Amino acid sequence: MPTPLSRRALLAGAATGASALGFPAILRAQAREVKIGHIHPLSGFLAFDGGLVTNGLTLAVEEINAAGGIKAIGGARIALSGGDTQGKVEVGMAEAERLIREGVVAVMGPYQSPVAFAVSQLCEKEKTPFAITVAVADNITERGFEYTFRVQPNARVITQRTLDHVAEVAKTSGTSIKTVAILHEDGLFGTTIAGHLEKHAKTLGMDLGLKVAYNIRTPDVTTEVTKIKAAKPDLVVVSGYFGDGLLIARTATEVRLETRAVMGIANGGFSNPKFLADQPQLADLILDGNYWHNPRSERAKRVMEAYQKRFNAPMSSHSVQAYSAMMVVRDALERAGSPDRAKLREALAKTNLTDHILPQGPIQFDKTGENVNAQPALLQNQGNKTMVVGPATFAEAKAVFPVPRWSH
């Protein structure tokens, strides 16, 4: 009676046969699939925001696979493997560790700067590329790490460029901005934006006279908004997430905030399509300096249409950024020609991607992993659409400034 073959013996025999045919086993098994991990808040108070980022990744992966996968790796399909951070640093770390253990070639994420700060350190230790989808804190890339890459503008760039854009809008309208107030969430994200705003405002002849912090879980911001109202600044800046952004917009309307404009910087709600659809009166003419697509790009228009069809909703700023980050990873995989993590890191460092949907020049990384050409667009909700009103190179509409609804 023949002795049954073990699974190990069968695999060994298959490998020998493959080699005999001239196809090394490692190559044959290599790349029917390239596994990429992502961690985002998919439950808890930031689940809506995290879902939008994940949608952007999903759209990009489906587009890549439909076009034949990673051609330099034998047409390998990208397999997206997710992890839920729950909005917590320790959970994000555990999920990133799990994904790395399971063999992902890169980790993407995580929406929150404190989570990104911790996970970037883990990825550096494990020599696994970490491609940031959304997280603005500058110090994430200020530690000499080689495996962290960020496509979006960091906190310093998004603050400075947004303020530059709105200063130009004010100048064009013949109206000056001398005083600024900021209402910001009290975490790493909001405090970092506030710090940069204070410094850069001075270079533009503006005075940041008031900084008011709040907790994103607070159910009421009347006290904070009333403080801002009493100061009567020329410009009110708000940096926070989706839920708290809507709460602030509603409260500002109720207390009849007096200013020339209300503007977000990297705000999770102000230019979000859901805000515009659900609360058009609250959203009307609010400005936001944020990640966005290039409205003059035909490719960007096709991507926006595909997103609408796939998710039955307009594409948001965070979805745009996640889509773009995945396309950067795809480009690097094609040039690396391998799912090897070290080779992927080398390819990412040499990125010079011109075929993208962002309002900027080529995507290129400096030695710290920052995209040197990254910049936000200045947006304004006009009618039933969020329009790019700055910089002039990408503008599709003229800004309304000062905003009549805030000028009493």
Image (cartoon, grey):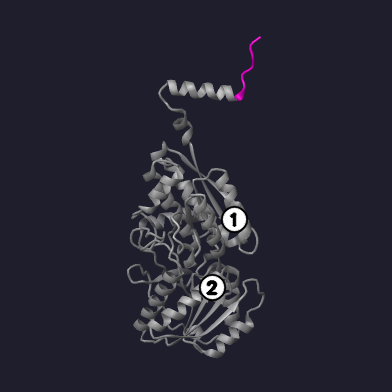
Q: Secondary structure at mark 1?
A: helix
Q: Name the spot of residue 219 as percent of width and height, x first.
A: 67, 75
Q: Amino acid at mark 1?
A: Met
Give the residue number, with chain letter if any, for mark 2.
Answer: 190
Q: Secondary structure at mark 2?
A: helix
Q: Is residue 66 above or below residue 244?
A: above
- Direction top: furthest residue: 1
Part of the protein shown in magenta:
1-7
Q: Nearer the viewer, residue 265 or 209?
A: 209
User: Marks 1 and 2: CB-CB under 8 Å?
Assistant: no
User: Magenta stretch containing residue 44, yes or no?
Assistant: no
Q: Name the spot of residue 117 as percent of width and height, x first.
A: 53, 62
Give the residue number, with chain letter if any, for mark 1.
Answer: 93
Q: Is residue 377 above or below residue 173?
A: above
User: Relative to residue 218, is residue 316 drawn left or right?
Assistant: left
Picture mark count? 2
Q: Amino acid at mark 2?
A: Gly
Tell me which secondary structure the magenta stretch mostly adopts: loop
Q: Name the spot of residue 204 as percent of width and height, x first.
A: 38, 82
Q: CA distance from mark 1 to mark 2?
A: 22 Å
